[in-house]
Amino acid sequence: MFITLTELRYIVAVANEKHFGKAASKCFVSQPTLSIAIKKFEINLGVVLFERNKSQVTITDIGHEIINKAAQILESADGIEEFAKLNNDIYSQPLKIGAINSVGPYLFPRLVTKIKTSPIKLIIEEGFTEILTNKLLAGEIDAIIVAKPFDKPNLATISLYTEPLKVILPKSHILANKKTKINPRHLVDETLLLLDTGNCFREQVIKICPDCIIPKSDNKKMVITTSSIETIKYMVANGIGISIVPSFSLTESQQSLFVIKEFIKPIPTREIVIAVRKSFYRMPVIHELSSIIQTIYQ
């Protein structure tokens, strides 16, 4: 059979949008045109890529495999055109970089300052790991900065830095003036401030103290969730509770607002990596950017 790039774009669009109408709009065709083309594609291959009903589109197991291969083929095809446009100048186009919400606000301002003397141009965004990963796989961004564990078959990672995690306490807290390091069990009976569900840093904090999220018998002790580390820090400063934060999120100007405590050994850390598609052809730029980021946190 003869497979066209257009057909591959249609099935990848449906996989990304989980909706035939939205996929058709993204491909600038009518929904019947897209649906007929995909149905013909499935018949010719003798497989079912999508399970369809009125409320949702579900990708079948074989569909996942074929769509992944289709995405790789499209990336290669798009790469030919992009390579020609760049005329061998890997710096002529901006590098589109995403970072998780617990990294971006603290890294990007320093990084943008650092690369002023570099030929690298950046377009940056922040988001959740899952959303950024999907955008990376779809070719909408070039690389993402995330925390390990992170293992995707079509993506390669480069280690950037390892970051210790620290506890922040209100100045009025009983442990604030004691010269002691924090044992995770000290946190069990505290009101703990966490990031919202969906944020990978929340899961890292829970692994440090899994008992902290068990409902307390004392209704004054609870788990409070919020959307950003900055909000958490100011809630701690106002005596609402305690929290665990990445050490590189702590600025000198904020250190007068609360007390910062280290953990006992082994000190909890997180490893930050940059992930990129294995087929990405501007890898020299990624390696250069990685080196710059590594100098920021030496």
Image (cartoon, grey):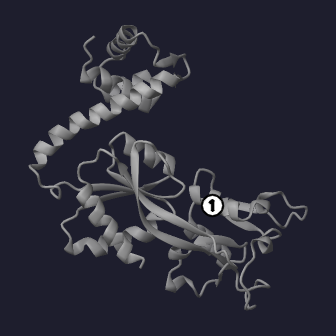
- The x and y percentages for residue 13 are 37, 29
Quadrant of residue 93 in the image?
bottom left
The amino acid on which the numbered mark 1 sits, given as a three-letter code, is: Gln
Residue name at image x 50 percent, y 46 percent: 130
Answer yes or no: is residue 59 visible: no
Residue name at image x 34 percent, y 33 percent: 71
- The x and y percentages for residue 100 are 48, 58
What is the total number of numbered labels drawn onto the structure image? 1
In the image, is 123 to the left or to the right of 240? left
Classify 286 as above or below 44.
below
- SS of the residue under disc 1: helix
- The x and y percentages for residue 118 are 21, 70
Query: In which quadrant is the C terminus drawn?
Result: bottom left
Q: For label 1, count other residues whose C-alpha is less than 10 Å away and answer few (under 14), some (14-19) or many (20+).
A: some
Q: Nearer the viewer, residue 212 or 28?
A: 212
Residue name at image x 28 percent, y 10 percent: 1
In the image, is 157 to the left or to the right of 85? right
Answer yes or no: is residue 61 visible: yes
- In the image as oriented, which residue stretches furthest toward the right? 217
Quadrant of residue 215 in the image?
bottom right
In the image, is 264 to the left or to the right of 149? right
Q: Which residue is mark 1?
A: 204
Residue name at image x 40 percent, y 42 percent: 154
- The x and y percentages for residue 155 are 40, 47
Q: Nearer the viewer, residue 189 or 163?
A: 163
Classify 176 as above or below 14.
below
Classify 142 as above or below 8.
below
Classify 98 as above or below 288.
above
